[in-house]
Image (spheres, rainbow, N blue to C red):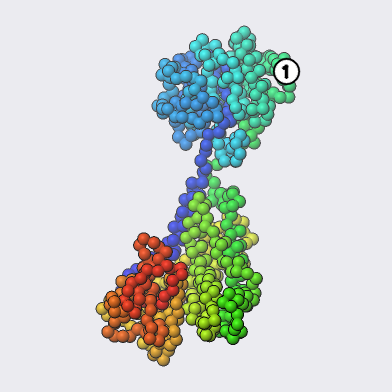
Amino acid sequence: MMKDMDFVKTQLVVQSIYHFAQQLDQVTPKIEDGVLTIRVVGEFSAGKTRVIREILKDKIPEPFLPISSQEAQTKLQLEISYGEQDQLFLIEKPEDMDEAIILEELKEFPTREQVSLYDPETHRLRLLIQEPLFILSQGDGYYEGDHPTKMFLIDTPGWNSGDDDLAEQDARKFLVGEHNLAIVYVCHANRLDGELNQAHLNNFLEALGEAQLQFVEKKSHLQVIITHCQSDNQQRLINRMQQRIETAWQDLGFQTDDLLLKINAFDFAEMSEKELIQFRQNFWSDLLKPLNHEKFEFNTSYSQQILNWQQDWDIRPYLLQHFDVTAKIENLIPNFCIDGQFIQNMNMTRLKGLSEAEIQQRLTERWFKQLNIQNAEELSLFHQFVNLPEHHPLSVWWNEYWLVELKKIYQPIQDFIVTMQSSIQQVDENVVDLQVYLKQQLDAIYITFSLQHPQTASFQLLLKTVKNNMQHLALDQFIATLLKLSILQSRYCDHYQHQSLAHHPVQIDDGSTWLDTKTGLMWAKISMGQIWENNQCMGQASLMNWQQAQQAAQNVTLAGFNNWRLPTLDELKTLILESEGYTCSEQTLSQPQENVWGRYWSSTSDLENEEFAWSVNFNKGQSLMSRKDNAKSYVRLVRHH
């Protein structure tokens, strides 16, 4: 009984599609830190902490909630942004543009005493929460590119605490960032007219005006929130604050149109849940409006992801190149051999009197004319067969399935072209019969592609289907259909292979094989290039390089079997004795040429250099190592009985 066999090709295709799906599942790009900031500024105990709590309601875990000014607050700036999980860190980051150096992960929001040793000009707290509003899906516009970046909400220490040197410094130092979306100015309704508040406001507005080009809209964007303001006083205080800011702005020499001002007044304690929700929505809507903010989607459908692929990920232009190669080959093949001649109506008599270089030039020109081409560049097939980079979702499917199948079709043809070019370069006045010479060089490899194998035929059918019926499809539909067709094609190939191997073939007892009962190996009596006719070997064997031999073995049917292969080095050695050559007592294997044995390829590559493979000299019994690409030897096929 034959052991069950895996559906190798189908498994490869399915695994490559699984890899494709995994890549799409992980397409959420890395979200890097940006430099765009929203700063929350104001007097100590003005209500900044309450504002932050309200705009991020239920997003900040209880241990990480900023400590209220009514308690012992920290004097470090707190920057809040998106994180895949909720985390709080102590970081070193002097400027917004600097990369954050994480010093410690904290389990809860620290008190003032716990961070008292850290310089507020160089250190900050960083709170990461699972809030997608902080993700700018198209980037923050500061750097080139449209990859997602994080925006930061920065809570600055309040002035007038009597203990914060940073907060008491000039506003240019920390109240305005390098790249600003908005500044949120928080003030207490009862201290709106305070002398200290007025001084800080003027200093702050001066810094704001000087930094207007550092805002997204190249205009200073200021949101004022008046806290602890009862409803009956709200409009009055809003009007007073607006007049005060606009007057101070103009007195500082700035244009009214260069200030985007929004003022609101609230008393959070008296607001209903519905009103708090509306406040939260309006706050974010007003802030993000200049960005034309699009909600960041973590998981989109495969279809949408494919439609959003960057332009160089579209594989259809590559396929068009493959179709061009196919059309080129279809035009070339009928002219490779005309009336049994590889260079039609050309013989050595016509080349008489020419030098070796002139002979080779004349043959090349005649061959090009026969193929209807102008130069050798038109015969280069594989320069367009490029691998996809590893980060492309289809890289495994493309590199390990698609290109492999293409090369199975085109490699024998390319090998034929290379062999023909090499054969022409070896022609000189010593060649007696040009057509016999070319036949010896080219017959074996020409047969490998002129006899189409059912498995390569199925892939050619897939190519025609894609070319003739799928080019009108959108990219997502195109990819889905192509992957389905690749599964069908691979299943057909595996099924064909199983039918060939799992069922006992009908053995044709024509004497063309010899079974070595000692090893259980069945050998072809003839070498590649010869034929078995009337119970005898006819013709002379072909010399070919190692790659040609491997390819040719896949297309041979002999005595009813089609699973022939190159023998290993050890298998070849069973036919010879070292230093004596071929000595099988049965003396049943035919010589490749009359009274000549020569060297035969094995399938065994050199362990130290894959560019070399082993062969066996049947004249002397020696094992030799030769380059796979340019050394030529005979080929005798074997199979397990």
**Residue at 55 percent of width and 76 percent of height:** 424
Q: Is residue 238 left or right of residue 522?
A: right
Q: Is residue 401 above or below residue 112?
A: below
Name the residue located 41 percent from the left edge and 19 percent from the top edge.
114
Relative image position of residue 12 (x, y in whole percent): 44, 61
Classify 201 as above or below 215: above
Q: Amino acid at mark 1?
A: Gly
Q: Hey, which residue is sitting farthest bottom in the picture?
A: 534
Residue 275 placement, left or right of 259:
left
- Quarter of the image with the C terminus in it: bottom left
State whether residue 85 is above or below residue 334: above
Badge 1 is on which residue? 253
The percent position of residue 627, horizontal first and vertical second, equals: 42, 67
Q: Nearer the viewer, residue 270 or 55?
A: 55
* The quadrant where residue 638 appears: bottom left
Image quadrant where residue 178 sits: top right
Question: Picture coordinates of residue 317 (x, y %)?
Answer: 61, 58
Residue drawn at x 34%, y 79% is 619
Residue 603 at x, y = what percent?
38, 70
The foreground one among 628 and 126 is 628
> Which residue is drawn at the image coordinates 26% and 78% (left, top)?
518
Is residue 469 among the parts visible in the rendering? yes
